[in-house]
Image (tube, helix red, strand yellow):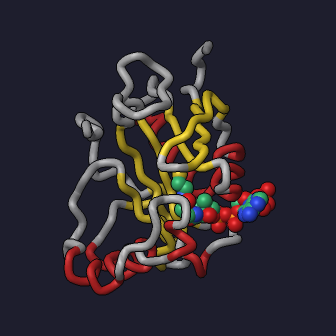
Amino acid sequence: MADLDGVPWPPAPIRTPRLLLRRPAASDRDGVIELLCSEAATRYLGGPQSRADLSLTLPQGPTGRPGVFTIEANRQFVGTVSFDRRDASRPGHVRASGLEIEVSYAVLPDELGNGYGAEALAGALGWVAQVMPREPVVLCTQTANRASMRVAEQAGFLEVARFEEFDAEQWFGVRQPEGATA
Ligand SMILES: CC(C)(COP(=O)(O)OP(=O)(O)OC[C@H]1O[C@@H](n2cnc3c(N)ncnc32)[C@H](O)[C@@H]1OP(=O)(O)O)[C@@H](O)C(=O)NCCC(=O)NCCS
């Protein structure tokens, strides 16, 4: 999959009213393991991984891949928001060539219910608007994932399509850049 080639990285940390979005650090490792082995955080994303396996296999430090932000609240890791390019072979696109900027997000189970997802997404979309001002951002989430659907709506994503993938109904939406006509 193509990554975010050409995007300036690492970014300056992004502050929102309660959160800091920053590039990942080695100290995030325990939090990332907690996310990936959490039933709540992975229910709509393929299911939890084994903590023991993750402890052995997850790299000790961040990969440095552009587009991955750690979400921090009260100086603690609480989740991630990340951008990638949507593989052209998958369903759901807003342009013929595919490879749109796609966002995803996850918050630790103990931190749910605080609205951190919407706040982090708003901050991260501000970053996209600065560094890729002409790019639409797309988002795909299961329709059963009500919290994620609500976060997408709060961030201004509009429905483009619904389709079946991974044995579930998926909602595919887009947030066009400021000033776009379509
Ligand atoms: C999506 C996610 C980040 C949202 O976490 P959060 O910011 O703590 O969300 P909140 O609990 O504050 O809820 C956000 C909104 O959804 C609503 N919501 C939450 N659960 C809901 C449910 N089961 N049904 C309907 N609405 C729900 C909340 O009421 C809130 O709306 P409001 O602001 O109008 O009150 C979190 O659920 C998560 O990490 N999920 C696992 C990872 C995932 O599935 N990511 C999506 C991949 S794109």
Residue sitting nearer the eye, 157 or 74: 157
Residue sitting nearer the eye, 40 or 32: 40
Which of the image's four quarters has the N terminus? top left
Q: Residue furthest front?
A: 167
Q: Residue furthest top?
A: 181
Q: Is residue 85 above or below residue 42?
A: above
Which of the image's four quarters has the C terminus? top right
Residue 70 is left or right of residue 155, and the answer is left
> Ligand 1 is found in which quarter of the picture?
bottom right
Where in the figure is residue 156, as x and y percent of width and height? 67, 38
Where in the figure is residue 166, as x and y percent of width and height? 47, 49
Locate residue 5: give its quadrant: top left
Residue sitting nearer the eye, 31 or 160: 160
Please tell me how many numbered marks the rendered image carries: 0
Q: Is residue 12 above or below residue 160?
A: below
Residue 115 is left or right of residue 75, and the answer is right
What residue is drawn where x is 48% and y is 68%? 79
Residue sitting nearer the eye, 38 or 121: 38
What residue is drawn where x is 29% and y is 70%? 25
The answer to whether residue 123 shows anywhere in this view is no
Where in the figure is residue 181, as x and y percent of width and height? 61, 13
Locate residue 178: give its quadrant: top right
What residue is drawn where x is 50% and y is 67%? 42
Q: Residue furthest bottom?
A: 52
